[in-house]
Amino acid sequence: MSINLHFTEEDREHIERNWVAWWAGELDKPLVVIKTIDPLFNRAPEESSREFLLEKPINEVIDYFQVRIEATHFYGDALPTWWPNLGPGIVTGFLGGKVEPRADQHTVWFEADEPVPVEDLHFV
């Protein structure tokens, strides 16, 4: 699969150096992340919905997002990314929790493998 990005290997190397320096506290400027999309790019609002992501075959979802990312321009310290937005709770899924999309309710539920008592939660 070929993808046509408005982004070069030189862009990636430069931006990677900036991000590494920023995380190390060695960058003397803020990171600036700006992305724009071609004004001619057209999409229906429902195409970014959870229903779209959950009900379409995966190849159609990937094709849709490929066209979108190819229409995107990256400025400053922006990197090409794709975030299928399933809400902030998706981190639970990344950490091994159960992810239960409910398209009929327009939501996604997340559950831990084992319940954790409130007194055992520690926020840093």
Image (tube, grey):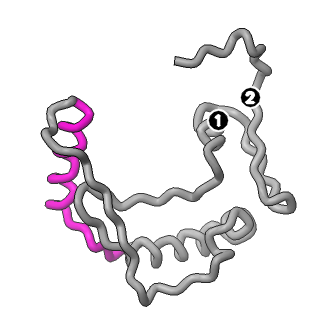
Report which residue position mark 1 lands on.
Answer: 92
Q: Which residues are magenta?
A: 3-24
Q: Main secondary structure of the magenta part?
A: helix
Based on the displayed image, in which of its 4 quarters is residue 50 positioned? bottom right
Image location of residue 67, percent across then percent down: 46, 78
- Which of the numbered marks, if any, corresponds to residue 112? 2
Whether residue 66 appears in magenta in the rendering, the answer is no
| Residue 79 at x, y percent in the picture | 32, 57
Q: Is residue 19 above or below residue 72?
A: above
Amino acid type at circle 1 is Thr
Amino acid at dot 2: Ala
The residue most toward the right is 104
Mark 1 Cα shell of 10 Å, populated few (<14), some (14-19), many (≥20): some
Q: Is residue 112 above or below residue 50?
A: above
The quadrant holding residue 89 is: top right
Left or right: 16 as drawn, with respect to 112? left
- State the residue at coordinates (85%, 58%): 105
Q: SS for tag 1?
A: helix
Counting from the top left corner in percent of width and height, residue 1 is at 41, 72
**Mark identifier at residue 81:** none
